[in-house]
Amino acid sequence: MHAYRSHTCAELNKSHVGDTVRLSGWVHRIRDHGGVLFVDLRDHYGITQVLCDPDSPVFAAMEKVRSEWCIRIDGNVKARDESLINTKLPTGEIEVYVRDLEVLGAADELPLMVFGDQEYPEETRLKYRFLDLRREQMQENMKLRSDVVASMRKRMWDQGFREYQTPIITASSPEGARDFLVPSRLHPGKFYALPQAPQQFKQLMMVAGFDKYFQIAPCFRDEDPRADRSPTDFYQLDMEMSFVTQQDVFDTIQPVLKGVFEEFGGGRKVDQAWPQISYADAAKWYGTDKPDLRNPIRMQDVSEHFRGGEFSLFAKILEQEGTEVRAIPAPKGPRGEPVGRKFCDRMDKFARSEGLPGMGYIWWRSTVPSLEELGYVQFHEMGDAMEMHTFKQAIERREAWLAANPNAYEAAGPIANKLGQEKCEEIRKELGLDVGDAAFFLVGKPKAFEGVAGRARDVIGKELGLLDENRFAFAWIVDFPIYQQDEETGELDFDHNPFSMPQGGMAALEGDPLAVRGYQYDLACNGYELVSGAIRNHKPEIMFKAFDLAGYGEDEVRKRFGGMVNAFKYGAPPHGGCAAGVDRIVMLLADQQNIREVMMFPMNQRAEDLMMNAPSDPTSDQLMELGLRVIPQE
């Protein structure tokens, strides 16, 4: 027999009854039933119940065993009584009577329990991650991650891609985040960088003629942490193709991701049609470039209804150049409950908490009298016959009232009082709203309020029950601006990826830089950015011009990107690609709210590894060898 196990803790069933077996694993749970010890023995694959009574030669030793001890047992497989079968376990029809026991690794008192679903502080979980990872949910999350990566690889190979590895130590590159710098011992005073992405190398592979590349690539960015972003490193499905258009990239990556979500989405609906929405429209309709399309709310520009009108606050602001009034419709949810004053006040308070002066609103309420107001009296106050009589009378009165008042609703709220019913009715019709619905309004320069408007849209959709939670809704966001302008200095800088090909090529760069759009795209799903990519700027003269507009002269471009610029002089093909965030995809599939739940050994919110004590202080010898000196922080 094998030194540690003849079977895993998920393999045994009724066909093994009578066999002598050997199992190894961790003590998941111990129960003492009148002197008989029942132990759930767990390994990576499952759980088997083993039992030990006073007749067993190792009963005394088994009494000393505690949770999370690692043990080996030998025993005989027995069938459980029919009434004791556990249908939730693959091994639920049997149990193993222990004849021999070996403690492979005893455990100290546990800082967190593996059995059960108790909540523990994140600092505890990360410091003892090796224990946290033993928990069932974490085991399932990591297995899911591994399976998703394997599926991605297979799907890419099936489309004719090959996997190539790119360097981990490279040169610093401006890609929108801070680099992690690595000092060079052989070149004192100089630094390498960990790659933010394999961007330049994968483009160089296209110049080298490899045509279709992919990699499950580690990327390193010194960023502030968020629930959906690691502060140090992450993995992405990175790909690049030659001789392709933007649509070719979409047609290639879309079936890969759609297949992964269908395979691992747990039966949730995966949208088959993925719309393409311009960056400008995404900002206007959803307040973000990663909209959650499970939420049907679409914001609209309703400035004309307020321009020069009775509501002077909005009218005066609209006199300023570049200002708008945006409306966020708030329709009744599936339960049909009207959106009332309390909800509107709550959303106004939300806007204030986000740094805005507030958020105006209108709600449309019914003016039809209630049956009680029309004379109906319930039976506990009168007899049944009298109740029916008053009910019929109330119905007749309501029908007469409705005939005389066909528009049995009114717009309510501070804005409605100033704007008037006629204007409010025009707004209601434009927004497609009905009685019991509401609308919220923000005014000013869109860039100042779009972010808050987008978050308000999310809150409204969620609180009113408008989201289809059992769905993955995808959208391509396209036509990103190449440049942005600093409002204070007026200087231009790249708004997104600096390596994107401008739509219109060199001619586009001769006009207004802020009007230039790039062949750049993101894929959004349920409010998260999953993919980012572009058709690349592969012509040196266009690249020099693009960087020059952002304040980088030709010498600076050659210094920073000399390898790529040099390569583009030797027959560079048109090429493009994208990268899909593996961690974020798995987070969505696992239905988790924090990316650390699907990463094996993540950092905490302060970019610290509490388990390995990183970052740590270097020794004097290390600093001397690298020619570095640490300046003490005040």
Image (cartoon, helix red, strand yellow):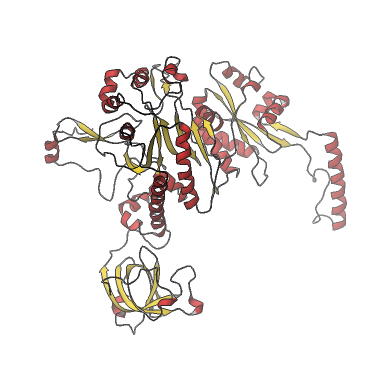
Residue nearer the viewer, 577 or 337: 577
Image quadrant where residue 228 sits: top left
Quick one: quadrant of the N terminus?
bottom left
Residue nearer the viewer, 266 or 207: 207
Say if 515 sits above or below 609 in the image.
Answer: above
Residue at screen point 50% across, 79% down: 82
- Residue 157 position, x and y percent, is 39, 46
Residue at screen point 41% across, 34% down: 533
- Residue 435 position, x and y percent, is 71, 37
Say if 455 sits above or below 152 in the image.
Answer: above
Residue at screen point 84% across, 55% down: 382
Residue 605 visible here:
no
* 624 relative position to 519: left or right: left
Q: Residue furthest bottom?
A: 55
Residue 99 visible here:
yes
Quick one: quadrant of the C terminus?
top left
* 510 relative position to 337: left or right: left
* 411 relative position to 226: left or right: right
- Residue 604 position, x and y percent, is 34, 45
